[in-house]
Amino acid sequence: MAIEDNPGSRTSYGDELRRRREAAGLTQEELSMRAVMSRTHIAHIEGGRRRPSLEDARRLDKVLATGGVFERFLPTQGEGAVAEHFAEALRLEEQATTIRVYGPKLVPGILQTRTYASEVLASGFPPKTPEERDKLLVTRLNRARILDDFESPVVWTLLDEAVLRRPVGGPAVMCEQLCHIADLGASHRIRVHVIPFSVGYHALMEGFVSLMWFGDLPPIAYVEGLKTGRVLEVPSVVRQCQLAYDHAMGDALSHRESLVLIRSIAEDYEHALRE
């Protein structure tokens, strides 16, 4: 089945990539060298286990002279449901057995409450219509459902103190959000560690990172900046991200100390509501 027949299927997409590659007389290794992609990543795409990025699809189209086929029929998570650069990370997040995430400025998406997420989505630029915001909000809240299973995935959350202090939506929103994180931590569903301001510079200050491990696939790292994001799969690069996370974790407060700090700041927001 050609991908034109079923553009939403990752398996069909992978089958088509294999067919076109073999028709061009290329091995996975040869295609990987010409398209500047790892052979492992190409194997996962052909097996329906990974989704290519937009840049990957464009390189495949160029090398295989397919006239934009692989770019036009990228498997999607639903039009407008997430930013293009996050679509692959979202799919991988749903498959992960272990997630270690660092939030430098905002609460990571899987931990956001409805009111906090609504404020973030409403404050973004360019402005979104109410319909667009509602669609994004549903997707973001659905992400939190991976925490419904108490045992999997294992989630570690590393937060810069700035995440706790920045009053997104005001005291009421922040009080609810911080209590939600503290409750998840107190119930042992997640581990929470805060990097206090007193640490100064630390290994993850450059931006957001999410590390993911899987039962039958190599680990990946997802990094994100302003209007950009990228899934990293090259083992040496993923390992560097893991080591940076471990280094920053060494500067963080313990789980117990972090919960005390989070609840203390939540109480400060609650007191501000009474003034």
Image: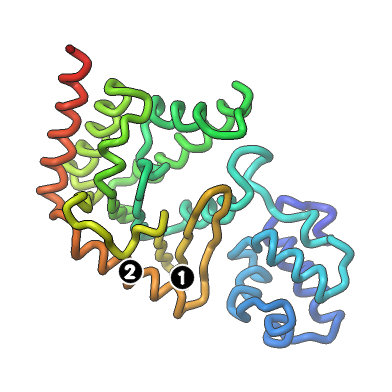
23 versus 145 height, above or below: below
Q: Choose mark 1 or mark 2, whichever is in front.
A: 2
In front of the other: 202 or 221 = 202
Please indicate whether residue 26 sits to the left or right of residue 206 in the image: right
| Quadrant housing the C terminus | top left
Going by the image, does 184 lie left or right of 169? Answer: left
Q: Quadrant of the N terminus?
A: bottom right
What is the spatial separation of the Cα atoms under label 1 and label 2, in whole angstroms? 24 Å
**Label 1's element?**
loop
Q: Residue at x 29, y 31 (%)?
A: 177
Q: Please tell me which residue lies in front, 6 or 93.
A: 93
Lower position in the chain sequence, tag 1 or tag 2: 1
The disc at residue 114 is none
Residue 135 quadrant: top right
Residue on which the image places disc 2: 244
> In percent of the image, x 81 and y 76: which residue is there?
63
Residue 163 image position (x, y, % from top left): 31, 41
Check the image and report above or below for 106 versus 51: above
Which numbered tag is attached to residue 216?
1
Give the colour scheme shown. Answer: rainbow
Residue 246, position as x, y percentages in the image: 27, 68
| Residue 59 in view, yes or no | yes
Label 2 sits on what residue type?
Answer: Ala
Residue found at the far top of this picture: 275
Mark 1 closeness class: few <14, some 14–19, many ≥20 residues within 10 Å: few
Decide which of 241, 27 is in the foreground and name it.
241
Report the residue at 35% width, 49% height from top: 103
